[in-house]
Image (tube, grey):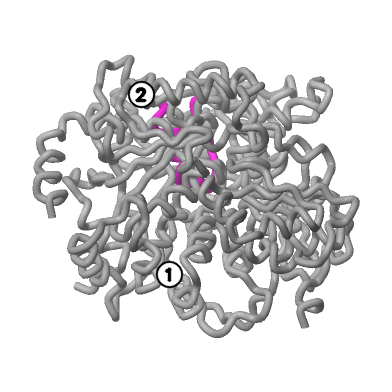
C-alpha cells in the first residue's frame, strides 16, 4: 500500500449528502476481475449524460475545479460494500475524501487502499464547501501525523480522528494481511481451543 | 457483568487485541461470490499466500447470473468471465462452490441459511453489505470489502474495532397487511440512513419474537440501510426449529449440545446498550419509499413530506415526485419481487395468496425471481407457480437480478418499479430507473392493479 503522510492540494466540492457507492461506481461496471481502470467510470451517471456526452454541470467536469481532495456532503459512501468505490476514487486520482460523516464499510475500504477519509465537523464542512466553491484556487493541507486539515496560509483548520493502528499502517504503507499473518500462532491456538468444543 | 447477545458472540471470537487498537476476530464462515472475490484471490496469489481454511469458505454465483435460460452459455462476455474465474479460483483452492444450475445455488443470503450453513452464535462475513441478513439467527454477520476478503482468506480473521451497541424494540400487535418489510422500512424511515453507523443493532420485542425466520431475515437484511454494520435477533425455539434438519446443520447429540449453548446467547436482563429506540407495532402500516435512499419512506396512506433541503429536492426531482403528494394511484409499469430481502418461500406465499384468482394488469411487467434453486423448487411443489402462471406472471430463475441490475434484468430509464429489494438509490435498478421499495404484498397488489393502492383499505 502507498504511504500517506501529508498532502497539499486544491480540492473539488461535491455538496451532496448520502452519496452511496452505487453512485460512486454503478454495478454494471463491477464485472472486472482486477483492480485497475475503475477511475474511468467513477460517478459515471453523474459525469456523463445518457448519450455518453459529458454532463458539464457536474463538479468533476467543471474546469474551475481540480485536485486530489474531494470534499463531499454528509454520510459519504453509504450502501453497498463494494471496494470498487474506493478503487475508483483512487484510480481517478483522489488521495483524500473530506466529509462530516462516513459510512463504516466505505471508511474501512478506503483506509485499506491508502485513500484517507477525513471526518470534519458539520460546521467546518459547510464553510469549507462554500470556500472552495467560491475560490477554487485555494489549497488545503492534510497532515496525517498531526491529524489536521487546514486551508493553506490561513487559520481555518479542523482536527480529525483516526484509529492509531490504522494511522501507523498508512504512514508506513503496511496492510492488515501482514499483521494477521504475524498472528498465526495465536490464531491456531484459538482454533485448537474453540473449534473442537 | 451483564452482556448483550452481541457481546457474547463477539467475545467468544476474539483471538487477540492490539493495545488502543483493533481486535483480531475469528471468522467461522466466509461466504463468497463472483463480484467481490476475484481481486482478493489475485492478491493472495501475487503475494504467494495460501488460503488458510478453505473448508470454512462457501461460494455461490448470484450477482451476475442470468435469470432465464441458465442452462445456456452466458451471453455477456464479462459476466461469463467473472463466473469462470470464480469456478477456477474455487477449484484451485478446494473451496465448495454452488455454481449456476447446482441444486444449492442461490443468492448467498438465501442459500446459506436454508442449507443450515448459518447457525446461531457464529461469526459470518461476506463481501456484500447484506450479510447482515444472517444476524436473524443470532450470529454476528456483516459485509466486508475485498481487502478484508483477502485478509480472511489469509488468516480466517479480521482486524476490527468492537462496534457500539444499539437496540431497537418493537412491541405490540402488527396490523393486518403489515409485513416484516414494512417494520424495517418504518424503522429506517424513523431513524434515518446513518443512525446505525458505528453500531451493531439488536432487534427485540414481541414483534420479532413472533416473526418467522424468513421475516427476521428480511429485517436484519436491511440493517445496513440505516448504517448499522449488522443486525441481530436472539435465537429462540423458532430459530432452533428452523435450523434442525437442514442439510449442513449439526445432528443428534451435537445438535442438542449446540442448542444448549445457543440458549445462553440472548442478552442478559439488565445489560445496557449505547443507544436504544422503542416503537409501537400499532403505529406501523404498509410502507413505500418515495426518494433515493431507504430512509425516505412513508406509510402508503401518507403524503410525501414537505422539506426544504437541497439533497431532498434533488432526490424528488430524480423520482419526478412533488412535495406533499400521495403515491396512491400512481401508475406503475414494473414490479420486482425478489432479492436477498424478499425472495424466500414466505414472500412468494404472500404474493400468491394475494394474486390467486386475479390477473396481472396489462401495463405491468412483473419479475418474480426466487432467491435460490430450493425456493424455486418449493414454489413449484406448493403449486404457487400455477397460480402465478394463471394470473399472467412469469417465474424466473434464481439470482440477485433487478435488485442491482448487473445482469440483463434492468428497469428502463424513467420507469417506476415497485420493488421488494433493499435499495432505491439513483440508477440502482438500471440507469435512470426509479425504485419504490415495498413489501411483497404491496408489490403484488401493484402488479394486479397497475398502480399503487392503499392496501390497508382493500384488506379491510
Residue in front for this viewpoint, B138 or B237: B237
Q: Is residue A72 above or below residue B201?
A: above
- Residue at horizontal 44%, vertical 36%? B98
- Residue A110: image location, x then y, percent: 45, 33
Tag 1's secondary structure? strand
Question: Left or right: where does residue A61 sit relative to residue B45?
Answer: right
Residue in front for this viewpoint, A135 or B400: B400
Q: What span is in magenta? A: A95-114
Q: Is residue A196 visible?
A: yes
Q: CA distance from mark 2 to mark 1?
A: 42 Å
The answer for which chain carries disc 1 is B
Which label sits on residue B278? none
Q: Is residue B321 above or below residue B303?
A: above
- Residue A164: image location, x then y, percent: 29, 40
Q: Is residue A150 visible?
A: no
Is residue A97 one of those drawn in magenta? yes
- Label 2 belongs to which residue? B91
Q: Residues within 10 Å of mark 1 (few under 14, many from 20)?
A: many
Q: Residues within 10 Å of mark 2 (few under 14, many from 20)?
A: few
Residue in front for this viewpoint, A136 or B172: B172
- Label 1 belongs to which residue? B167
Q: Quadrant of the C terminus of chain A?
A: bottom left
- Residue at horizontal 82%, vertical 37%? B413
Residue in front for this viewpoint, B171 or B51: B51
Amino acid at each position: 500500500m502507498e504511504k500517506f503522510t501529508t498532502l497539499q492540494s486544491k480540492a473539488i466540492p461535491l455538496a451532496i449528502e448520502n452519496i452511496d457507492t452505487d453512485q460512486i461506481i454503478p454495478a454494471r461496471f463491477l464485472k472486472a476481475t482486477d483492480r485497475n481502470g475503475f477511475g474511468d467510470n467513477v460517478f459515471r451517471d453523474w459525469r456523463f449524460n445518457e448519450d455518453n456526452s459529458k454532463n458539464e454541470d457536474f463538479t468533476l467536469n467543471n474546469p474551475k475545479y481540480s485536485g486530489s481532495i474531494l470534499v463531499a456532503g454528509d454520510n459519504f459512501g453509504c450502501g453497498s460494500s463494494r471496494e470498487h468505490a474506493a478503487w475508483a476514487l483512487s484510480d481517478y486520482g483522489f488521495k483524500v475524501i473530506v466529509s462530516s460523516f462516513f459510512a463504516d464499510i466505505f471508511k474501512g475500504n478506503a483506509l485499506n487502499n491508502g485513500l484517507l477519509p477525513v471526518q470534519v465537523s458539520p460546521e467546518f464542512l459547510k464553510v469549507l464547501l462554500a470556500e472552495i466553491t467560491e475560490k477554487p484556487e485555494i489549497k488545503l493541507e492534510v497532515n496525517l501525523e498531526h491529524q489536521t486539515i487546514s486551508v493553506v496560509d490561513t487559520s481555518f483548520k479542523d482536527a480529525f480522528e483516526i484509529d492509531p493502528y490504522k494511522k501507523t499502517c498508512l504512514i508506513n504503507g503496511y496492510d492488515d494481511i501482514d499483521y494477521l499473518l504475524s498472528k498465526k500462532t495465536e490464531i491456531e491456538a484459538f482454533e485448537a481451543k474453540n473449534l473442537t468444543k | 457483568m451483564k452482556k448483550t447477545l452481541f457481546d457474547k458472540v463477539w467475545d467468544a471470537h476474539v483471538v487477540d487485541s492490539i493495545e488502543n487498537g483493533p481486535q483480531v476476530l475469528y471468522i467461522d464462515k466466509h461466504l463468497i461470490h463472483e463480484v467481490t472475490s476475484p481481486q482478493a484471490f489475485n492478491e493472495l496469489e501475487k503475494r504467494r499466500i495460501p488460503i488458510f481454511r478453505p473448508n470454512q469458505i462457501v461460494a455461490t454465483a448470484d450477482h451476475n447470473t442470468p435469470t432465464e435460460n441458465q442452462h445456456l452459455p452466458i451471453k455477456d462476455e464479462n459476466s461469463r468471465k467473472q463466473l469462470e474465474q470464480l469456478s477456477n479460483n474455487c477449484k484451485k483452492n478446494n473451496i465448495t462452490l454452488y455454481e449456476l444450475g447446482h441444486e444449492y445455488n442461490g443468492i448467498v443470503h438465501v442459500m446459506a441459511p436454508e442449507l443450515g450453513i448459518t447457525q446461531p452464535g457464529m461469526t459470518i462475513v461476506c463481501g456484500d453489505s447484506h450479510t447482515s441478513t444472517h444476524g436473524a439467527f443470532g450470529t454476528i454477520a456483516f459485509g466486508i470489502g475485498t481487502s478484508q476478503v483477502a485478509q480472511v482468506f489469509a488468516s480466517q480473521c479480521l482486524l476490527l474495532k468492537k462496534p457500539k451497541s444499539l437496540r431497537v424494540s418493537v412491541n405490540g400487535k402488527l396490523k393486518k397487511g403489515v409485513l416484516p418489510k414494512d417494520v424495517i422500512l418504518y424503522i429506517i424511515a424513523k431513524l434515518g440512513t446513518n443512525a446505525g453507523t458505528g453500531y451493531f443493532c439488536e432487534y427485540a420485542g414481541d414483534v420479532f419474537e413472533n416473526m418467522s425466520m424468513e421475516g427476521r431475515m428480511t429485517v436484519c437484511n436491511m440493517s445496513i440501510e440505516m448504517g448499522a454494520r449488522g443486525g441481530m435477533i436472539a435465537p429462540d425455539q423458532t430459530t432452533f426449529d428452523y435450523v434442525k434438519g437442514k442439510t449442513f446443520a449439526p445432528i443428534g447429540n451435537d445438535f442438542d449440545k449446540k442448542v444448549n449453548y445457543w440458549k445462553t446467547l440472548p442478552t442478559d436482563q439488565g445489560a445496557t446498550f449505547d443507544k436504544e429506540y422503542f416503537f409501537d407495532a400499532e403505529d406501523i402500516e404498509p410502507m413505500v419509499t418515495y426518494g433515493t435512499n431507504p430512509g425516505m419512506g412513508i406509510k402508503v396512506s401518507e403524503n410525501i413530506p414537505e422539506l426544504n433541503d437541497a439533497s431532498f429536492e434533488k432526490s424528488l426531482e430524480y423520482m419526478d415526485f412533488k412535495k406533499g403528494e400521495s403515491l396512491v394511484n400512481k401508475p406503475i409499469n414494473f414490479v420486482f419481487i425478489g432479492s436477498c430481502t424478499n425472495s424466500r418461500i414466505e414472500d412468494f406465499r404472500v404474493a400468491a395468496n394475494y394474486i390467486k384468482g386475479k390477473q396481472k394488469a396489462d401495463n405491468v411487467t412483473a419479475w418474480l425471481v426466487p432467491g435460490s434453486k430450493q425456493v424455486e423448487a418449493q414454489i413449484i411443489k406448493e403449486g404457487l407457480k400455477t397460480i402465478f402462471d394463471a394470473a399472467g406472471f412469469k417465474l424466473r430463475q434464481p439470482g440477485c437480478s433487478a435488485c442491482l441490475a448487473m445482469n440483463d434484468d434492468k428497469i428502463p430509464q424513467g420507469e417506476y418499479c415497485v420493488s421488494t429489494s433493499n435499495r432505491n438509490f439513483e440508477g440502482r435498478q438500471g440507469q435512470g430507473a426509479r425504485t419504490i421499495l415495498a413489501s411483497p404484498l404491496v408489490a403484488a397488489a401493484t402488479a394486479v392493479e397497475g398502480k399503487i393502492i392503499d392496501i390497508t383499505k382493500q384488506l379491510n
